[in-house]
Amino acid sequence: MSVKIEPDLPGNSEASQMIWLASAYADAAKVLAESMLTNDFAQHHANVRVILHLCRHALELFLKGAIGLSTGSVPRGTHRLATLFDQYKTLYPSRNYHFAFPFPEQVFFTDDMFPETIEQFHRTHDQRFRYPSDIKGNVFEGFEPFDVNTQAEAIANFWQRLHLIGTGIAWNDTFDAREPANGQRD
């Protein structure tokens, strides 16, 4: 039986559509990580990078969508998770809007004892999982081993929290309710 899926996204704005897409990217990462557990998706580093890229992109879309719903303007021209996450935490300070990410904490540092190191990391983080090297041909290094059991659980938790928080944030824009996106009432 063939299934026909219409080419539309939920949400009445680009910001809420980003949140729904973020949930889909995180869900795809979860499905692939769970498939890796059962050997239905090959257990090798190239596939790990695909899973991590899906998680990273899910987080970027989620942060941009949540910021856009709160401010009325989707952040453009940046892929830096640290910058986006700092803005998100300011707009959504309640712990109810926070969740764990399947990345090293370095992704969210905005300063470091060695600024040249952290700057290079942030400049290329959106490329680290998609390409073997940066635009100058420098091979991306510093990957940690991927424990399939631990990471599959972390990614499932990441998807669940992102989806639940994202649904709450995007619900009103998607279904025309009247409460502000950040959950604060006038």
Image (tube, rainbow, N blue to C red):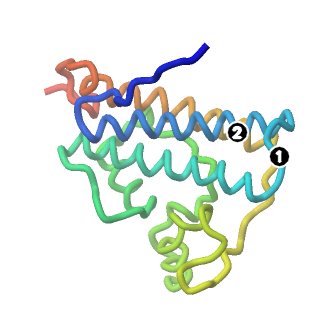
**Label number found at residue 1:** none
Q: Quadrant of the N terminus?
A: top right
Horizontal and vertical percent position of residue 30:
65, 36
Q: Amino acid at mark 1?
A: Ala
| Residue 79 found in image quarter | bottom left
Residue 58 as seen in the image, left or right of residue 176: right
What residue is drawn where x is 37% and y is 25%?
168
Q: Nearer the viewer, residue 5 or 91?
A: 5
Percent position of residue 98, x then y: 47, 40
In the image, 75: left or right of 152?
Answer: left
* Residue under numbered circle 1: 42
Q: Position of residue 28 (x, y in %)?
A: 60, 37
Q: Which corner quadrant of the image does residue 20 belong to?
A: top left
Question: Mark 2 is on which residue type?
Answer: Leu
Image point (35%, 42%), residue name = 93
Q: At numbered mark 1, what does the secondary structure look like: helix, strand or loop? A: loop
Residue 31 versus residue 54 in the image, above or below: above
Q: Nearer the viewer, residue 71 or 86?
A: 71
Residue located farthest toward the left when viewing the structure as drawn: 186
Q: Which mark is residue 32?
A: 2
Question: Of helix, strand and loop, which one carries label 2?
Answer: helix
Disc 1 from disc 2: Cα separation: 10 Å
Quadrant of res 183: top left
Residue 166: tell me if it is visible: yes
Q: Residue at x 61, y 68 (%)?
A: 131
